[in-house]
Amino acid sequence: MKKSVFVFLLLPFFIFLTISCLIPVTQDFWSATSTLGDPSARSGHTAVWTGTEMIIWGGFNESMPQNDTGARYNPTNDTWTATSTVNAPSARSGHRAVWTGAEMIIWGGVDAPGARYNPTSDTWTAVSTVNAPSPRRNPTAVWTGTEMIIWGGSATSGGQLNTGGRYDPDQDTWAAMSMSGAPSPRYVSTAVWTGTEMIIWGGRILSSVTYFNTGARYSPASDTWTATTTTAAPSGRIHHTAVWTGSEMIIWGGSDSGLGPSNVNSGARYHPTDDTWTTMSTTDAPLARTNFQAVWTGTEMIIWGGSGELSDFLNSGGVYNPICDTWAAMSTIDAPLPRYNFTAVWTGMEMIIWGGYVPGYICTDTGGRYR
């Protein structure tokens, strides 16, 4: 009797779930971001969302190999405000940026210190170099709520790294990370923060055509690493994306071989609770691509842009629902110019993309907002 009641109570939930999974995306649209007062055209920059603004900083373009400039974009009134260059970090690309809730922290990209930017006062404060990780390009970076964790990347002197460090902005101090059980040295891997752990996955060694389908979970509380299973894991890849849903990490896209065209439109969801992978549906999935961007909306993953097999520039994408394991195509009406190596943030209401390379292999200062 109790089992029958339990099933009866669950029935409305499953009916709702089935119906909701059958409802397509019927209203989605793009609008352009203003170019009045925006930063110079660039790629290789970073972007963070503060809760009210998107901050763009650094990067490069055809006439400026490295930038030390940036700007804040306010979507409410579609305006840009330049960030101060007084005490700003040295010009760079290949760096990383995180938002702490009050400041943006810039680190890496060059053999020079990072810095913290306060948008309220429009001021920069240098980050300590005492016990900091060795200089590197393209590391991973996550914000834990109290610390920025840097890991991996390419040494500025050459070669890949499997070292890192934890930075506490309140104390302006660095703490070293254990290397016991850490993933093998790599760059262009991805990282997500789960609330208690950082999960590293994928990437490669520059001198090798082997792309990793391995990773590990790092716990700052215990300073320990735990390897992620390779059973049912996606193929090893680079230039893929990773998002955290609140209960699982979603890996999608990228390139899975160093030999010829190799872009993929496959992916999988990793469950750290039981160390298992679940393969994602490819039905109606977007075209295979690399160097695109992905954001998590709270219920869905949106992927857009990038470089495809037949075209280096895409302005298409898709919306993935992990509960239903389904894809929905995105509108291309009024979409921004096709591009790759751009940035994207999720505001809570819309995805904002900006910059990158557009057809003609030139950097752009244009962007778009997707709802």
Image (spheres, rainbow, N blue to C red):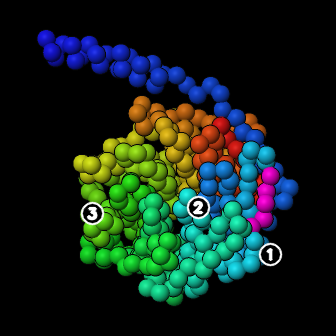
Residues at marks 2 and 3, CA–CA distance in whole angstroms: 33 Å
Classify 279 as above or below 220: above
N-term mark: 2 or 3: 2
Q: Nearer the viewer, residue 113 or 29?
A: 113
Question: For the point 57% across and 86% down, which residue is it?
Answer: 111
At a point 48% along the width and 37% down the height, the residue shown is 299
Which of discs 1 and 2 lies nearer the camera? The answer is 2
Q: Amino acid at mark 1?
A: Ser
Residue 166, image x and y in percent?
Answer: 42, 73
Q: Which residue is mark 3?
A: 227
Where does the magenta region start and end? 79-83
Extreme residue in the right direction: 36
Tell whether label 2 touches label 1 (CB within 8 Å).
Answer: no
Q: Secondary structure at mark 3?
A: strand
User: Badge 3: few (under 14), some or many (20 or more) residues near its Cα, within 10 Å?
Assistant: some
| Coordinates of residue 140 in the picture (x, y in percent) | 47, 67
2 or 3: mark nearer the eye: 2
Label 1 or label 3, whichever comes before in sequence order: 1
Q: CA distance from mark 1 to mark 2?
A: 33 Å
- Badge 1 density bin: few <14, some 14–19, many ≥20, Cα 10 Å: few
Q: Which residue is mark 2?
A: 102
